[in-house]
Amino acid sequence: MIRNIRFIRSAIGKSFSTGKPAAQWNAGIVTHSANGIASCAVRPLSVIPGASINQNGVFSIASRQIHTKGERELVEFLAEEIVAEKKASPTTNIPQSLNGFKITFNKAEVELTKSSEREKVTISFNVNHTVDMDGEEADATENKPEISAMKSRPQFEVDITRGGTTLSFTCSYLPGEAQEGEYNDVFGIDEVTIYQGEWKDEVYAVAGDVLDGYLYDLLMNFLEEKGVSNEFAEKMSDFASSYEHAKYVELLEAISKFTVEQK
């Protein structure tokens, strides 16, 4: 299944429509035109030992690399899926900054930081298990593919550090969208705590839903002043969606490479 755009696949030849000539998969060989998906097959070759494209545009995997029927079927599907996922990718470039926050990555973990003479603001989250469908899915018909965008809405931590003291918020994206004429927050505060030095289990924290309503609103305004506004949260969700999708494609490539590696 293509995660960002679902296609209705034909039952014959396992073909799919991308608006260009379809690829046909048979016994580990896929043929395609130079104007079709051939250019997108360069990346899969880098992760599949023994794979090649000859001058006639035939992509093949050396049979000695495939040990079982199940492995061959898996590799064939993954090669097709990787090409489709890259076509469906919202962006090919992952930004290094967002609204003045510097972005750093460590596999599934992401950290955004912004420093001034007075304080340091750090936002951190993990993209694992954070995607869901964005909006209602379209009805699938033979002539109308089912469209369903995947959005990443991770729970995130906001740490505001001054000297050795950190005021920390745990925040989550809220479900639903604002109706016309209404204003709804994009995210909410799950928990608030403050501590000296490093955080420890014994540090007291209070849940956001038991805070005084006026205090809660003041804390949301405080976060907005630090750059964590509803608009910023929307942009961060878009960024997380792109980054999560890139990690998903990397996972598919790693599985493909693992499947055909020499034992």
Image (tube, rainbow, N blue to C red):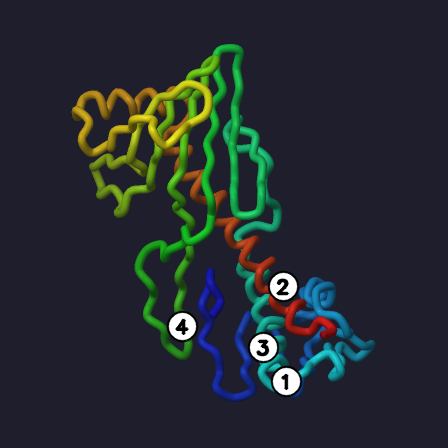
Q: Counting residues from the N terminus, which is met first, the one under dot 2 or under dot 4?
A: 4
| Dot 1 and dot 4 residues touching (CB under 8 Å) | no
Question: Please, what is the three-letter code of the amino acid marked with disc 2?
Answer: Glu
Under circle 2, the secondary element is: helix
| Dot 1 and dot 3 residues touching (CB under 8 Å) | no
Q: Residue at x 49, y 67 (%)?
A: 2
Per the model, the C-alpha gap separating discs 3 and 4 is: 27 Å
Q: Counting residues from the N terminus, which is met first, the one under dot 3 or under dot 2?
A: 3
Label 4 sits on residue? 144
**Which mark is on residue 74?**
3
Location of residue 84 (image quadrant): bottom right
Location of residue 216 (image quadrant): top left
**Which mark is on residue 68?**
1
Per the model, the C-alpha gap separating discs 2 and 4 is: 29 Å
- Mark 3 neighbour class, 10 Å CA radius: few under 14, some 14 to 19, many 20 or more: some
Report the side of 72 relative to 206 (left or right): right
Residue 61 in percent (x, y) is at 73, 78
Mark 1 or 4, which is nearer the eye?
1
Mark 1 or 2, which is nearer the eye?
1
Q: Nearer the viewer, residue 191 or 241?
A: 191
Residue 20 in percent (x, y) is at 60, 72
**Which mark is on residue 58?**
none
Q: Counting residues from the N terminus, which is met first, the one under dot 1 or under dot 2?
A: 1
Per the model, the C-alpha gap separating discs 3 and 2 is: 12 Å
Q: Nearer the viewer, residue 248 or 203?
A: 203
Query: Which residue ends up furthest to the right in the rendered image?
Result: 55
Label 2 sits on residue? 253
Report the side of 92 relative to 178 (left or right): right
User: Relative to residue 250, is residue 68 depicted above or below?
Assistant: below
Q: Residue at x 81, y 77 (%)?
A: 54
Question: Please, what is the three-letter code of the amino acid marked with disc 4?
Answer: Lys
